[in-house]
Image: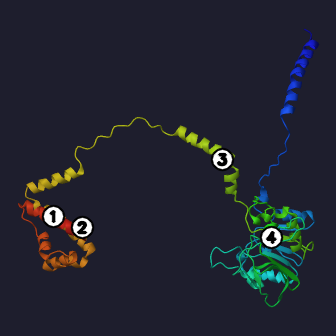
Amino acid sequence: MSTRLRWLLVVGVLVVLGVPAAILFLRTHERVTHTEHLPPQGEASYNPLYVLGQALRADGITAQSGPRIDLRRMQLQPGDTLVLLQDNADVPAPTAKALLQWVEGGGHLLLRTPPLPKDEEETQGPLLDALGVDTEYYDSACKPFHIADDPGHVEFCRGRRFGVDAPDGIRVEREWGDDDGLVFARLRKGAGTVDVVSDMEFLKGTPRPFRADDPKDSLADGLHDIAHRDLTRYLLDPNYAKGTMWLIYGSRPPTLWSRIFYQGWPVWVPLLLALLGWLWQRSQRLGSVLPAPATERRSLLEHVRASGEHLLRYGKAPLLYDAVRRAFLARLRRRAPTAAALAGEAQVHAIATLLQWPHSRVQTALQVPPSKDVVALRDRIRLLIQMRNLL
């Protein structure tokens, strides 16, 4: 068979098998597009204001982000805007005073009220105190925010409402709220502005899982919602495009060890298993049970008993009594040195008083028994041991 004929047969077989298979696949399968939302990566995973910063940079505005206020690094200038998502209670008094001086020179400060306290002793911080903002007797409550295409829209559901009693030098320019308290207030101090809101969830760019049965989930889209963008633009309006936008998000990036543990497990888990396997391979194997080693023919107790019986057999019972009496007197000197320093009847009386024993019983215990009286020896030794244990 020629080469040309062979290739023609191969192509014919492929056409005969491939065309019906392609028709069958197209008739039994349908192309479906599915969008999978991946979790945030990098800075977006720990910076709630990351999307806001990117939007401001896309609009040609200089935006800087940071976890905490650092006035030395920031070098705030008139015309700058500071968005403070950090809890105000963490701002020390000197920093709060410096911020208000910067606002008076033309800065714009945007901050929120602290969350509901877990402890009655928690304070709202010196910054809100200096502004005359009071949050002590207020709770959380949603505020209707009328939108043309969303008539049931609400805002500030997860924040803590407040009241304002502006001190000298500060003027309330605008406020928004109802009988439950304010959700927004714009304060004028010198050439600058301070905006206080009860909640900043709408500024965050990371959406939360939406639940239709929860009215507070109108905030679930963050800056992805058009109404939230309009509200954000209104709050940033005083110094918009005049200076630098400083976004203080109040959280820290994950540590190196947490990244290694949660993200590097495909590397360290196999290495750990390999290490455990190597240790198991190199460890000593357990064989059959070895017989117990041969014990000595006599134990220490047997030697002591044999020595005592030897002394008793040869009339040396006073030596046994004297050893127990010395042990009792040694403990008496440690526990009651005054009684040990006495002698005769005075010592007997002191010991009887200390142990609350009869005088005759103590006197019997301290008398040396006759060398041949085994019963008296055992009785006195028993009494001395009891007296020693009671000290």
**Which of pointers 4 and 3 lies earlier in the amino acid sequence?**
4
- The CA span between labels 2 and 1 is 12 Å
Label whose residue precedes the other's in the sequence (2 or 1): 1
To which residue does mark 2 refer? Answer: 389
Q: Give the label on residue 155, or none.
A: 4
Amino acid type at circle 4 is Glu
* Mark 4 or mark 2: whose residue is earlier in sequence: 4
At x 8% / y 55%, what residue is drawn? 314
Q: Earlier in the sequence, mark 1 or mark 3?
A: 3
> Mark 1 and 3 residues: CB-CB less than 8 Å, in contact?
no
Task: Please report whichever mark, 2 or 3, sits nearer to the chain's N-terminal start.
Answer: 3
Q: Is residue 262 left or right of residue 12?
A: left
Q: Residue at x 80, y 82 (%)?
A: 100
Left/right placement of residue 104 relative to residue 119 reads right
Residue count near mark 2 (Cα–Cα under 10 Å), binned few <14, some 14–19, many ≥20: few
| Distance between the alpha carbons at the discs numbered 4 and 2 | 78 Å
Image coordinates of residue 391 in percent, x first then y, are 25, 71
Amino acid type at image mark 3: Trp
Q: Position of residue 50 (x, y in %)?
A: 82, 63
Q: Is residue 4 left or right of residue 358?
A: right
Circle number at residue 268: 3
Please, what secondary structure does the residue beneath circle 4 have?
strand
Crowd around label 1: few <14 · some 14–19 · many ≥20 (10 Å): many
